[in-house]
């Protein structure tokens, strides 16, 4: 396979329930439909991206946990699985990831374990999308040490918007101390409900936030029950129901990122 310059994008928010995982799997699916070779790396011990791409967690199967903990002893290529959809691969998660922080507590360079493990593989893809846990843990630090771009999904809710301060500060610290190449690529509004005043108010706050000049996507992910339904079936919404507003919004986000 020819070497590419992969775009390595971490989808991060320290607050849970903002649409992080659905953004990972549906953006990945949208990119695969645009003939981009995509690798999804599930770094969340809750395994939602793994399940959302149709895979049942295996107690014994290799996962990103083995790749990080054991390094070169587990070739990363052997852990990647092909999804049912062309151009879309997955590095699955495992519940054991939740204990990795303790296991690597005294290991030098522990924040770069993921970067080192994926180095032989990464440029075989056009895009690497990384899902993260809803907390600032060693797992999130590993993702931010490896990524070149950060995509922040922000639910149009006051709590989610107020949590942006801490997240942007975290990214700035990572940039200064660990990964000078990282940058915030953009913020996308999620769970937008145009019928409610609060959703419209937070959307306007995001659009006018001086910290986000040139970084806020015009594409908005509207609230849509089909997205949750598709996750229950283990299918990205763009494959589950192409005519839904969820599929429409994520394909629009895909094209904005490609454009």
Image (cartoon, rainbow, N blue to C red):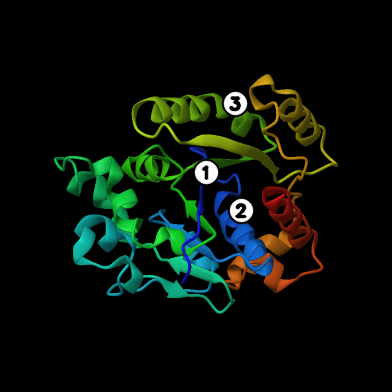
Q: 95 or 1: which is nearer to us?
A: 1
Q: 106 or 59: which is nearer to us?
A: 106
Task: Determine whether label 2 and label 1 are within 8 Å by CB.
Answer: no
Residue 28 position (above or below residue 187): below
Please, what secondary structure does the residue beneath circle 3 have? Answer: helix
N-terminal-most mark, 2 or 3: 2
Residue 162, disc: 3
Quarter-of-image position of residue 77: bottom left
Task: Determine whether label 2 and label 3 are within 8 Å by CB.
Answer: no
Give residue 64's position: percent from left, percent from top: 34, 61
Residue 38 position (above or below residue 181): below
Q: Residue at left 42%, top 57%?
A: 46
Residue 83 position (above or below residue 45): below
Asked whether residue 46 appears in the rendered view, the answer is: yes
The residue most toward the left is 106
Give residue 171's position: percent from left, percent from top: 46, 31
Q: Residue at left 67%, top 49%?
A: 257
Give residue 16's position: percent from left, percent from top: 52, 43
Q: In the visual, does 246 lie left or right of 72?
A: right
- Residue beneath disc 1: 16
N-terminal-most mark, 2 or 1: 1
Residue 123, disc: none
Residue 23, disc: 2
Please, what secondary structure does the residue beneath circle 2 have? Answer: helix
Gap in angstroms between the C-alphas marked 1 and 3: 13 Å
Gap in angstroms between the C-alphas marked 2 and 1: 13 Å
């Amino acid at each position: 396979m020819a070497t590419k310059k992969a775009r390595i994008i971490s989808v991060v928010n320290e607050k849970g329930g903002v649409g992080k995982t659905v953004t990972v799997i549906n953006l990945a699916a949208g990119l695969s439909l645009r003939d981009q070779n995509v690798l999804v790396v599930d770094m969340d011990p809750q395994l939602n991206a793994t399940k959302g791409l149709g895979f049942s967690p295996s107690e014994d199967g290799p996962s990103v946990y083995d790749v990080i903990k054991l390094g070169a002893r587990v070739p990363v290529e052997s852990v990647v699985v092909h999804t049912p959809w062309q151009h879309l691969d997955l590095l699955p998660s495992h519940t054991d990831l939740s204990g990795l922080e303790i296991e690597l507590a005294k290991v030098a360079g522990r924040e770069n374990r993921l970067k080192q493990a994926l180095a032989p593989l990464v440029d075989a893809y056009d895009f690497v999308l990384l899902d993260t846990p809803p907390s600032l843990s060693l797992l999130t630090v590993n993702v931010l040490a490896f990524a070149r771009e950060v995509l922040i999904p922000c639910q149009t809710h006051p709590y989610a918007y107020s949590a942006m301060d801490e997240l942007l500060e975290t990214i700035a610290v990572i940039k200064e101390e660990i990964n000078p190449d990282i940058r915030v690529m953009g913020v996308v509004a999620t769970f937008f409900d145009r019928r409610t005043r609060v959703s419209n108010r937070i959307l306007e706050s995001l659009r006018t936030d001086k910290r986000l000049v040139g970084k806020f996507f015009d594409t908005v992910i509207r609230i849509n029950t089909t997205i949750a339904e598709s996750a229950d079936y283990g299918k990205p919404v763009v494959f589950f129901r192409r005519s839904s507003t969820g599929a429409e919004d994520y394909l629009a986000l895909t094209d904005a990122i490609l454009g």
